[in-house]
Every structure is written in C-alpha cells, then in structure tokens.
Amino acid sequence: MSARPGYRMAPPLAVALLLAPCAATAQEAGPTDRFGGISAQQIEVTAGTGDDSASIGLQLSGERKLRDGKANTVTAYFEQFSMIVSTPFDGKNDAAPTTLDGLANGTKLTLRWGQFGGSARLDIAADAERIFEEAQAICRGKAGDHFIRSSADLGPNPDPEQRTAVEKARDDEIKECNNPENGSESLIVTHLSGKLGAYHEAQLPGDSFDWGFETAVGYKKFDYVDPTTLAAHDARKAQFSAKGYYTRYLRGSSTAISASVGYERAYKAADEEILCPAGIGTTPVTCTSASPAAPTLDEGVLVALGLRHRFRRGDGTIAPIAIAPQVTWDALDNVVGVDVPLYFLSDGDSGLKGGVRVGWRSDTKKVSFGVFIGSGFNLLK
C-alpha cells in the first residue's frame, strides 16, 4: 500500500474489520432455543411435527472495549445478556424435539450471559497490501477504459469544455482508486470481491470467539388420570437447566464451530393410553385417551456440537442462505438428536430471519420437520 506510507488503522476500523468475517455467521446464530445470542428484541414462532411454540427475547449488550495487544494488534471484547421467555402453543408438545431440550414441554425463562473477543492488526499485513494494490490496479484500469470510451463518444473534434469534463472524471476516478474515501475494504468489495475473505484473514492474527453460560427455569402442569377410576389429577413441576458454551469463528471465513455442555432436571409425562373404566352390567362405558400415571423425573447431561455457515456466491459476496446443524447427545439416556436449521428468509437487509429445520432422534427413529420465523439474528449487535 505504497500510496499510504506509515499506514495504521484507527481502532474503530480495526474493530469493524475484526467483526466483519464472523458477522455473517453470527447473524444466523440459530433459533432462540440455541445457545448464543439473539437480536436486541426478538419474537419468534416455530411450527413443527410435534406442535407450535412461540418465544420472545430481549438482549442487552455492553460497551465494546479495546485494549492494546502484542505485535501492533488491538483486542476487542464485549459482553451480552439475553432473557428469553418461550412456551408451546398447546402447553405440552415441543416443536423441535430433536434438540433434546427437556424443558421445552412447558413455559420457561432462559437467561444467557456471553462475552465476545478477538484481535485485529493495526498495521497492514503484506498479503493484505498486495490484495489492495491489485484492487487499485483494476480500479485504475477501469478508469482508463471509461476515459477511452467517453473520449470516443466526443468525436474527432470535441468541444474543449466537454474534453475537460471527461479528463476531470478520469482524474477523479483515479484519485478514488489511489485513496478510496470509504477505505481499502470498499475498494476491494467493488473491484476484487473474490479476495475479500483473504484480505480479512491477512488482517486477523487469529480466530475470534465467544463463550458464556445459560440457565433456564421452567414450569409445567401435567394432567393424568387414575387408570382404574379415570379420576382426573394434575401435578405441577418446576424444571431447571444450566449449560456453558463456546464458539470459535474461523479466521477469514463465514464459518463458526460451537460446543456446549449442560445439565437439565425436567419431568416427562407418561405416554398416553386408551383407558376404559370397569363396566357394571350392560351399562355403556366411555373410554378416554390420557396419561395413566404422574410424570417422572427426567435428568439429562447434554453435550452438543454445532456448526454455523453462511454461504457465499462465486464472486465472494454473501449469499442469502445459511445452515446451522447441531448434534446433541444425552449422556444419561444415551440418546442422540440431530437438528438442522436452514435459513433462506431475508430480513430485507443482510441478515436472515427464518427458514426450515429438519431433525432426527435415535430413540424414536423418527424424522421431524418444522419452520421458524422471527427477527434477524446478530450476535455482535
């Protein structure tokens, strides 16, 4: 970047560069039942083969802080707190059973705390400088082509004022190529977008990350009947879960890898059966479908691994499609759940707000389908 000797990036620009490679991934952090962040205020509706559910969330973000790092770098970090209330529409069924969330059968309050961190260079790396200079050369070549075409349009005897205007337009274009008003990244996006990821990677000394904790408390009323007399009963249970999570945003890419470990103490309703009271003589009886016993304690230790990826077009720009598969293993029950949200509904900007999800559970051997829609996700907002 010979046009700008002694280049040093201002700290706010360094933070923007730091967040850019992982922002596309973070915007698709997952439906509200996933660990990670949500948007500032979010309402989400999920419909699945089990049933429908709704959630409403509020997120508070702390001030972004900077501190000097090693070897001419700056480190950015900030905290986020989320509060989410969710409930199934029918009061009992989970719209996304493949997440193995035992508290999703009732109303629950989820609290999340997380911290994001990462580093960016303040000077410009040699590889990034070469990419920028290549974009400058393409820009200047286009300016020359524009000048040739405009000059040809003037004819063999152009008006001096028109000629002067064409020359000034060329000079302005070249000036913008040499010193782009909106920064080096805007020039690369315009003229060499396919190497934008490589430019970001050169400026980031390592991966970015976020980590945090989540706790949830839930309440569920279970209805059941006496299998002999069919007398109605109910049991009201409090449920609880806690987990820790960690996400790594791969340097210079739109991919993140996540992991979480958690414990949950929930209750499970007895499977419904067709129950008929004992008949007396020839008197007709009325049978019913109900749970024949009180709910039982269902503890779980859940280990989850997930991947979030925002696809890119052939020219390197972000495409309006993303995927966020997650595999969860309940170590106590030895059950595996696979949940795969696919995002393709745009929020009208650069984010995605909904799509479909497909899942599978090892205990039931069943495939589930669902849709979800809500406000856009942005973990780094």
Image (cartoon, helix red, strand yellow):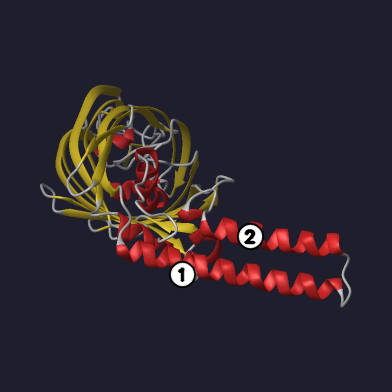
Could you say whether the residue bearing mark 2 is in a helix, strand or loop?
helix
Q: In which quarter of the image is the C terminus?
A: top left
Looking at this view, is 152 or 186 the one in front? 152
Residue at position x 31%, y 33% in the image: 277
In the image, taking residue 45 as reference, residue 281 lies left or right, namely left
Where does label 1 land, which residue?
134
Pinpoint residue 100: horizontal percent, then vertical percent. 26, 46
Question: Quadrant where the N terminus lies?
Answer: bottom left
Q: How crowded is mark 2: few (under 14 residues within 10 Å), some or many (20 or more)?
A: some
Spot occupied by residue 34 in the image (x, y as percentages of width and height): 32, 43
Depth order, front residue of 138/363: 138
Question: Can you give x and y, in whole percent of width and height, for residue 209 in the image?
Answer: 24, 46
- Location of mark 2 (residue): 173
Residues at marks 2 and 1, CA–CA distance in whole angstroms: 16 Å
Give the numbered dot on residue 43: none
Residue type indicated by callout 2: Glu
Asked if the residue at tag 1 contacts the one at tag 2, i.e. Cβ–Cβ closer than 8 Å, the answer is: no
Against 345, residue 234 (above or below) is above
Instruction: Identify residue type, mark 1.
Output: Glu
The image shows residue 160, relative to residue 6, as above or below, that is below
- Closer to the camera in the image, 202 or 34: 202
Dot 1: element: helix
State which quadrant residue 270 falls in: top left
Q: Is residue 318 visible?
A: no
Q: Nearer the viewer, mark 2 or mark 1?
A: 2
- Could you tell which of marks 2 and 1 lies nearer the N-terminus? 1
Query: Number of callouts in the render?
Result: 2
Left or right, 252 with respect to 228, comes to right
Specify whether residue 263 is in view: yes
Name the residue furthest left.
332
- From the viewer's side, name the closer residue of 285 and 20: 20
